[in-house]
Amino acid sequence: MQIQGSTFTYGQLGIQRGLAQLDQAGAQIAQGSVSDSSASSGNGLSNDQGSASVEDGLLSLPEAKVLVQAGAKVLEAQNSTLGTLLDIKV
């Protein structure tokens, strides 16, 4: 019998989504800092879109951290439950 949607899959998915969001936030921060320096040396106009990108990236970092931690806790609970059901402690 195959169980669809196991807790292992959900825990792993949470970790993957958190890491993907972390990558995206890092790219936003890096892209924003590059565009800010080029805007200030160019025509003297400020680049509000670049700073908004940096702020968005910085604000999404804690959310990514929580996603990874939640996924890890799901895997931890699944491991503990499975060990209890099989009378195995690791």
Image (cartoon, rainbow, N blue to C red):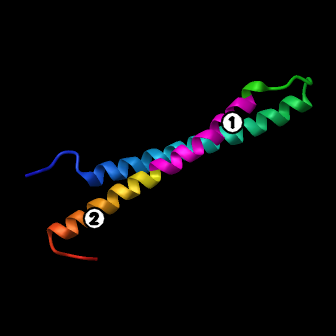
Cα distance in 3D space between marks 1 and 2 = 37 Å
What kind of element bears circle 1? helix
Side of 49 relative to 88 (left or right):
right
Residue at 50% x, 44% y is: 20
Q: Please say if 86 is above or below 24.
A: below
Q: Amino acid at mark 1?
A: Glu
Of label 1 and label 2, which has the lower sequence position? Answer: 1
Which numbered circle lies on residue 3?
none
Which numbered circle lies on residue 55?
1
Q: Nearer the viewer, residue 50 or 67?
A: 67
Q: Nearer the viewer, residue 73 or 48?
A: 73
Q: Which of the 4 quarters of the picture holds residue 34? A: top right
User: Is the magenta region chiefly helix, strand or loop?
Assistant: helix
Q: Quadrant of the C terminus?
A: bottom left
Residue at 18% x, 45% y is: 4
Which numbered circle lies on residue 79?
2
Residue at 58% x, 40% y is: 60
Q: Nearer the viewer, residue 41 or 15?
A: 15
Callout 1 crowding tier (Cα within 10 Å): few <14, some 14–19, many ≥20: some
Residue at 45% x, 55% y is: 69
Callout 2 crowding tier (Cα within 10 Å): few <14, some 14–19, many ≥20: some
Q: Which of the 4 quarters of the picture holds residue 5? A: top left
What kind of element bears circle 2? helix
Side of 63 relative to 85 (left or right):
right
Residue furthest out toward the left: 1
Estimate the x, y position of residue 72 in percent, counting from the top left. Answer: 40, 58
Q: Please say if 79 is above or below 54.
A: below
Q: Amino acid at mark 2?
A: Asn
Magenta highlight range: 50-67
